[in-house]
């Protein structure tokens, strides 16, 4: 009796990314990959051990920088960056480097771009570096954190990440370049040919990874290796629909690598519009008039405050720096300063250098005479990871209220959480630079 020919059976041949109970069938390059969505994702996270507070969705109050674009500002530069992401791959670069001086708003713009791309379902991941915050100031978990975000944002890539981890047992202990290639770049490339991703990239534009504060990463050699390999990858893979948006200060080890014809350079100073600072300050002062009785009483007796001339002079003095604008405003309206009024403090700000050093020095002087001041400020500046008030007190052998007494006067430059068990953080990392170069 003749043997019957094998029967070819196709199950769900036209289906894509189908969920059956706990199992998910991903169709990638015509292949079916079955993964148990809930358990496999949990296992992948356990293996990769990502940083949970490095992305744009972190609690910014407890995991700085706590920066966001003020409504109605930064529209010009945001429009420019989004247009770059949306442009055809053959017409533009895969990498855009937004650079600028301290406090000009790079992190706020990075957050805005991440949110916009997330809304259009094209954000692969984001990583916000920050000085002296443990793993967030190192490259140690950079690739594994982005890999977890990639798997969550693009499930089609998850099987390739899992395969790489299983195939190379030592991968998670290997160098950054190998991890980034095997866990992020290659899985995305493999998944990008799936129907959904291909359609999205053709209709909407490329997918994006946002990297903020690259200059705040302490592993300089790893940063150089990351940039070099990223540029090489896109030279060899010009049609992969993935782009990187990177922000940083101008540091030699970054500038020397990113000044490449494969990278688009954007100087944020060229996008710092006076109107943005004016909008910010006008809105802040209008809110202050409602919140502070002393300002309302002054206006009732003397007329509007600040006058247009005073505000214009202040805006010109700020010279485009949002962090300087924010810090100056906090200094002017500071409710804890009972020695002077906002009306008296505003003229003083015009004598402060457009940088932040004078503001830092003036603010710190308010607590400088208190006992334990130097020890508390030194602890904040020198510890590898930020400590809560209770941790600072325990380390120094003092009471928590003694720490609070020093810090309460410094809220214009230091973020004090609502409870004693959450970390105390600087409003901007430039304060740490100031403290470690100045005698406290």
Image (cartoon, rainbow, N blue to C red):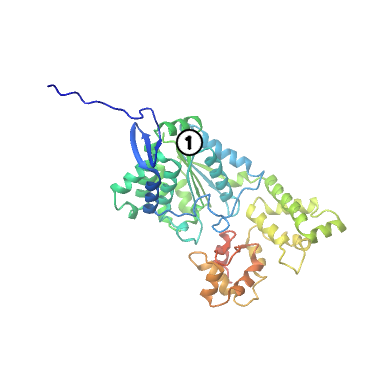
Identity of the residue drawn at 55% across and 44% down: 115
Identity of the residue drawn at 52% across and 70% down: 391
The residue most toward the left is 1
Instruction: Point out the image quarter for the N terminus.
Output: top left
The residue most toward the front is 1
Residue 104, given in percent of the width and then of the height, sits at 60, 51
Between 187 and 303, the residue placed more toward the observer is 187
Residue 305, given in percent of the width and then of the height, sits at 80, 55
Tell me the residue that label 1 is attached to.
206
Number of marks in the rendered image: 1
Between 397 and 329, the residue placed more toward the observer is 397
Instruction: Point out the image quarter for the C terminus.
Output: bottom right
Q: Can residue 236 be seen here?
A: no
**Residue 225, above or below 438:** above
Q: Can residue 152 be seen here?
A: yes
Would you call the spot at circle 1 few (<14 residues within 10 Å), some (14-19), or many (20 or more)?
Answer: many
């Amino acid at each position: 009796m003749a043997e019957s020919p094998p029967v070819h059976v196709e199950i769900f041949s036209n289906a894509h990314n189908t969920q059956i109970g706990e199992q998910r069938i991903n169709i990638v390059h015509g292949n079916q990959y079955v993964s148990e969505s809930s358990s496999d994702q949990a296992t992948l996270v356990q293996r990769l051990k990502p940083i949970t507070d490095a992305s744009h969705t972190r609690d910014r109050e407890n995991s700085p920088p706590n920066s966001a674009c003020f409504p109605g500002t930064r529209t010009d530069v945001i429009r420019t960056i989004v247009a770059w992401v949306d442009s055809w791959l053959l017409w533009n670069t895969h990498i855009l480097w937004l650079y600028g001086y301290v406090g000009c708003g790079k992190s706020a713009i990075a957050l805005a771009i991440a949110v916009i791309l997330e809304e259009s379902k094209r954000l692969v991941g984001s990583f916000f570096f920050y000085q002296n915050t443990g793993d967030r100031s190192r490259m140690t978990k950079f690739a594994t954190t982005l890999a977890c975000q990639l798997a969550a944002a693009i499930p089609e890539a998850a099987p390739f990440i899992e395969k790489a981890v299983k195939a190379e047992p030592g991968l998670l202990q290997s160098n950054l370049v190998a991890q980034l290639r095997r866990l992020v770049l290659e899985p995305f490339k493999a998944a990008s040919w799936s129907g959904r991703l291909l359609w999205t990239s053709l209709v909407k534009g490329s997918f994006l990874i946002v990297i903020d504060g690259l200059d705040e990463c302490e592993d300089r050699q790893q940063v150089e290796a990351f940039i070099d390999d990223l540029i090489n990858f896109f030279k060899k893979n010009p049609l992969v629909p993935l782009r990187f948006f990177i922000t940083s200060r101008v540091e030699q080890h970054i500038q020397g690598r990113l000044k490449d014809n494969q990278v688009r350079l954007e100087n944020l100073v060229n996008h710092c519009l006076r109107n943005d600072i004016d909008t910010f300050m006008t809105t802040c002062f209008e809110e202050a008039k409602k919140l502070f009785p002393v300002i309302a009483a002054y206006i009732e007796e003397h007329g509007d405050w600040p006058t247009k001339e005073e505000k214009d002079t202040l805006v010109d003095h700020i010279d485009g720096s949002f962090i300087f604008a924010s810090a100056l405003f906090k200094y002017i309206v500071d409710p804890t300063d009972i020695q002077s009024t906002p009306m008296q403090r505003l003229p003083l700000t015009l004598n402060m250098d457009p940088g932040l050093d004078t503001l830092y020095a003036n603010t710190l002087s308010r607590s400088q005479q208190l006992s334990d001041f130097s020890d508390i400020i030194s602890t904040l500046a020198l510890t590898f990871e930020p400590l809560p008030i209770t941790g600072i007190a325990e380390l120094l052998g003092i009471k928590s209220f003694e720490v609070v007494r020093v810090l309460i006067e410094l809220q214009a430059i230091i973020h004090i959480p609502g409870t004693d068990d959450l970390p105390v953080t600087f409003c901007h990392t430039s304060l740490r630079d100031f403290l470690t170069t100045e005698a406290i």
